[in-house]
Image (spheres, rainbow, N blue to C red):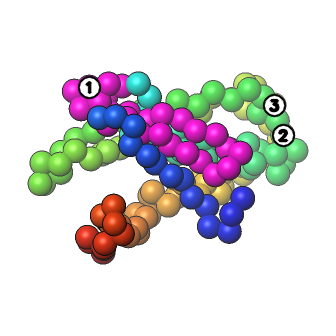
Amino acid sequence: MNDTPSVTITRQDKFRFLVDFEPGLGQIVADETPPLGDGTGPAPTHLLAAAMANCLSASLLFAIGKFKGDPGPMVTTATWEVGRNEQNRLRITGVNVDITLGVTGDSLPRLDRALAQFEEFCTVSQSVRSGIPFHVTVKGADGTLLTQD
């Protein structure tokens, strides 16, 4: 893995993009849902929800494992709502993550402590919760800087 992680997104057609992860991590196709795209792959909203659900699941697994527990085959489902902001732009207005453990709660040692701390281990959801600062640069095909914030 590089010192600076990266993902490269290349437009294929309409709103379909090839998402190329770091070498050795593979690629996926992302596409907007109709009417913008053809829905041939997950939309960006799916990818954000998947990242949050995956990170929270891994964080819970880690927290349970700290107390020598094994949650068995976990199943996590993320749902989200989309609404419009004051400028009438679509925004994700909420994400719900439901995690189901493969074992009963009473079979896990110190589950109360694991549940009290696992969310703090999740890099993605805690970053989203606090509002991730980001910067955008747009360049033309010739490398000319078109805009930068």
- Tell me the distance, in whole angstroms, between the alpha carbons under discs 3 and 2: 8 Å
> Residue sitting at 77 percent across and 44 percent down?
64
- Quadrant holding the C terminus: bottom left
The magenta span reads 15-39
For label 1, the residue is: 34
Q: Is residue 82 above or below residue 140?
A: above
Q: Residues within 10 Å of mark 1 (few under 14, many from 20)?
A: few
Q: Is residue 8 magenta?
A: no
Residue lying at the far left in this picture: please name it: 87
Q: Which residue is mark 3?
A: 107
| Circle on res. 61 | none
Q: Nearer the viewer, mark 3 or mark 1?
A: 1
Which residue does the image show at 24% across and 32% down from the upper left? Answer: 36
- The amino acid type found where label 3 is placed reads Ser
- The earlier-in-sequence mark between 2 and 1 is 1
Three-letter code, disc 1: Pro
Q: Circle 2 sits in a helix, a strand or a loop, which is it?
A: loop
Residue placed furthest toward the right: 68
User: What type of secondary structure mainly makes up the magenta span?
Assistant: loop
How many numbered markers are drawn? 3
What's the CA distance linking mark 3 and mark 1? 45 Å
Q: Position of residue 40 (x, y in %)?
A: 41, 24
Tell me the residue that label 2 is attached to: 69
Marks 2/1: CA distance?
A: 44 Å
